[in-house]
Amino acid sequence: MAYLHHTTSAAVMTQGDLWTTPETNICIDRSKKVPCKPSVAIQHSSSTVLFYVAGTSEAIDGSDTELDVTFRIVDADMKPFAGTATSDAAPVNYILHSMFSQVDMCLGGTLVSQSAMTYGLRSIIESTISYDKPAKDSHMTMRMWHKDTAGHMDAYTGDANEGLKKRRERVKNSKIVKVRGPLHCDFLTNQGKFILPNIDLEIKLTRAKDAFALMSTAQNERIEILDATLWVRKVALSPSVSLGHAHALERAPARYPFTRTSVKTITIPSGLRDKSIPNLHIGQVPKRITIAFVSNMAFNGSYRHNPYNFQHFNLNYMALYVDSEQYPAIPFTPDFGNDLWTDEYNSTFSDTGIKFKDEGHNISYDEYGRGYTLFCFDLTPDMSAHEPHWNLQKHGVVRLELRFKNELANAINCICYSEFDNIIEIDKNRHVVVDYNV
């Protein structure tokens, strides 16, 4: 037998390597997940939930931080439904996150998150694209994820919407429910490095309107939060690693690369067929943009409209421009009236890193045009927005061109979910340096 080519090198199968042993982790002595209660007791009238995690000699594993919330649905007077009193109220999907409109995070007293009262929309977009059916049918149900039935997203009564029906069963008669899961928070959960010891962490969650988070006939039910806990994994680093970190910090600050997200909303008035959004972003160009549309009434909070009903509104033209460069090369021209949206549906795979893989996002072709209409744009030169490496940073002006088949009957909101590569630095004195204008 001979080599196929003279440039190839010899290799041994791992099954034939009988002497190599696994590497040993010497970084961590121990770790434990500890509960943190709100710094201010939760009351009926509380509009925020604040957690304060004091810095100690232990590091924090932000990627394993979880929030759990115990709640129930009550009447307008904050009284539980009992006896003959009933309600058909049910939470919208992903209620663990939908009950909050904003999450602010401070590190060492420095605000490192960016939010614009769109936390629920951010959470649902990230989860819709990032998780496949096995996850959505298992651990995500712990966060009360039950997929809405395409074409029946706004059905607030009856059983047409299977997801709403399941959520209604879980909360009926003011049953106490506990939900738990990770936060959708920049830096905390989307980067894998330990947060240095002796630095304080603050997280403030701002409540969303009950009309946004619930769907019902009576239109006056409320969510009563009974308890909340932030679970934080504390990590005791080994003495040698701690000493190495201290020496390294004398020479340079610790660096934390992470993906920063921005969610912008643009209101498009009724009566329009064409809309140009000229300054979607000015400065750093995102690595990926996801576009969705919801009715203005649902966006502002309505018990009878699903805020996550991403409709197409008979859009028949969409193009994104970075300065003079157009994305995609041939604009999107769907014909939703005739179920022709292949290119647009394909963008949820090709521009998210799923393309040709044995995985998906649990949105079928038919469902895409009936409440799950998302448009994805990967703006990196090598289509690597989902990869950990960086690309050369580009600065410019991003604009969006839209055209609808018919004049809009009602005002709608354009949701622009953008992702950027950024970095945060922490020096030896635990000063946090944030610069998003790179």
Image (tube, rainbow, N blue to C red):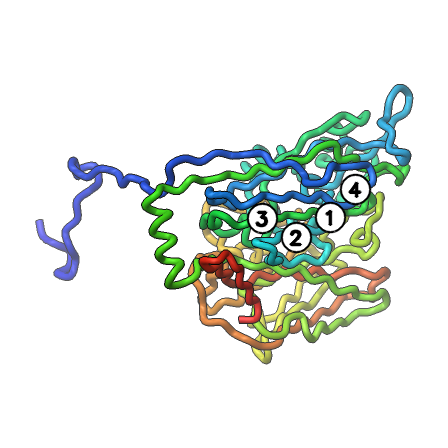
Q: Nearer the viewer, mark 3 or mark 1?
A: 3
Q: Are marks 2 and 1 in contact (CB under 8 Å)?
A: yes
* Amino acid type at mark 3: Leu
Q: Residues within 10 Å of mark 1 (few under 14, many from 20)?
A: some
* Amino acid type at mark 2: Asp
Residue 42: which quarter of the image? Answer: top right
Q: To which residue does mark 4 refer?
A: 46
Residue 206's tag is 1
- Considering only vertical position in the picture, is 122 above or below 272? above
- What is the residue that sits farthest to the left in this orientation? 1
Residue occupying image coordinates x 46% and y 61%: 384
Tag 1 or tag 3, which sits nearer the N-term? 3
Q: To which residue does mark 2 refer?
A: 104
Q: Are marks 4 and 2 in contact (CB under 8 Å)?
A: no
Residue occupying image coordinates x 67% and y 70%: 280
Residue 201's tag is 3
The residues tagged by marks 2 and 1 sit, at their Cα atoms, a distance apart of 8 Å
Secondary structure of the residue carrying tag 3 is: strand
Q: Nearer the viewer, residue 333 or 135?
A: 135
Secondary structure of the residue carrying tag 4 is: loop
Tag 3 or tag 2, which sits nearer the N-term? 2
The residues tagged by marks 4 and 2 sit, at their Cα atoms, a distance apart of 16 Å
Q: Residues within 10 Å of mark 4 (few under 14, many from 20)?
A: few
User: Relative to residue 210, is residue 308 drawn left or right?
Assistant: left
Q: Nearer the viewer, mark 1 or mark 4?
A: 4
* Amino acid type at mark 1: Thr
Tag 3 or tag 4, which sits nearer the N-term? 4
Q: Nearer the viewer, mark 4 or mark 3?
A: 3
